[in-house]
Image (spheres, rainbow, N blue to C red):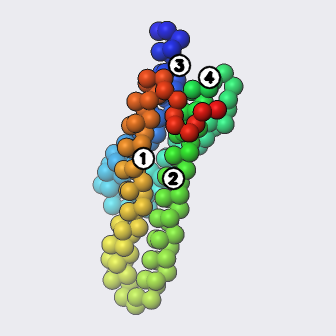
Amino acid sequence: MSETDNTAHLASQPHERMMFNMAIFHFLLPAVLFATENLWLIFAVPIACSLMMILSIWIQAHRPANKTELVLAHWQCAWRRSRFLIVSYVVSLVLFIIAWAVLQGQEDPNMRMIQLAVIGWFCLIPISLTVVGLIILETSALAQARKGIMPQKMRL
């Protein structure tokens, strides 16, 4: 493998990690955990795993040692985009807390759980839209990284 190929391979790793994060922790793992019928597991485990993956991207983006300018720029690009995912988690959590607080006025506990389950799915819309957008952005960035192209607005 030539030096250019090796650099392109190293530059593509952050975007591959982001794509893995979104594919496994936002599609596959929730589908598998859906069989448990435990709503907290369905939401908490994938988000916790995703946050650990984002932490690994953050660590690499802030560790410039032994990285070329191209490789570091792609790690920083992936980190910047990971922050959108974190913001979507926070927005969804805030929406869920607001919905939960509003539904505390519901006197029938069974009806409250049904309404919370329905509204809870709507609270996931920010995460879903962010994941779709990031898949599009990361696919483009992955193609650029494999060609050895510096991400736009990331020239160091």
Residue sitting at x 44%, y 35%:
141
Report, in whole angstroms, how far the alpha carbon at label 3 lies from the one at label 1: 23 Å
According to the image, label 4 marks what residue? 68
Q: Secondary structure at mark 1?
A: helix
Report, in whole angstroms, how far the alpha carbon at label 2 lies from the one at label 4: 25 Å
Report, in whole angstroms, how far the alpha carbon at label 1 lies from the one at label 4: 24 Å
> Which comes sooner in the sequence, label 3 or label 1?
3
Q: Secondary structure at mark 4?
A: loop
According to the image, label 1 marks what residue? 134
Taking 92 as reference, is 54 above or below it? above
Report, in whole angstroms, how far the alpha carbon at label 2 lies from the one at label 3: 26 Å
In the rendered image, residue 28, in percent from the top left (x then y), is placed at 34, 45
> Which comes sooner in the sequence, label 2 or label 3?
3
Report the amino acid beneath label 4.
Thr
> Which comes sooner in the sequence, label 2 or label 4?
4
Taking 115 as reference, is 27 above or below it? above
> Which comes sooner in the sequence, label 3 or label 4?
3
Describe residue 117's horizontal placement relative to residue 70 as left or right. left
Q: Classify 10 Å Cα crowding around label 2: few (below 14), some (14-19), many (20 and above).
A: some
In the rendered image, residue 116, in percent from the top left (x then y), is placed at 38, 75
Q: Secondary structure at mark 3?
A: helix
Q: Quadrant of residue 36?
A: bottom left
Report the amino acid beneath label 1.
Leu
According to the image, label 3 marks what residue? 7
Q: Quadrant of the C terminus?
A: top right
- Residue 135: tell me if it is visible: yes
Cβ atoms under marks 1 and 2 closer than 8 Å: yes
In the rendered image, residue 146, in percent from the top left (x then y), is placed at 43, 24
Report, in whole angstroms, how far the alpha carbon at label 3 lies from the one at label 4: 8 Å
Q: Quadrant of residue 117?
A: bottom left
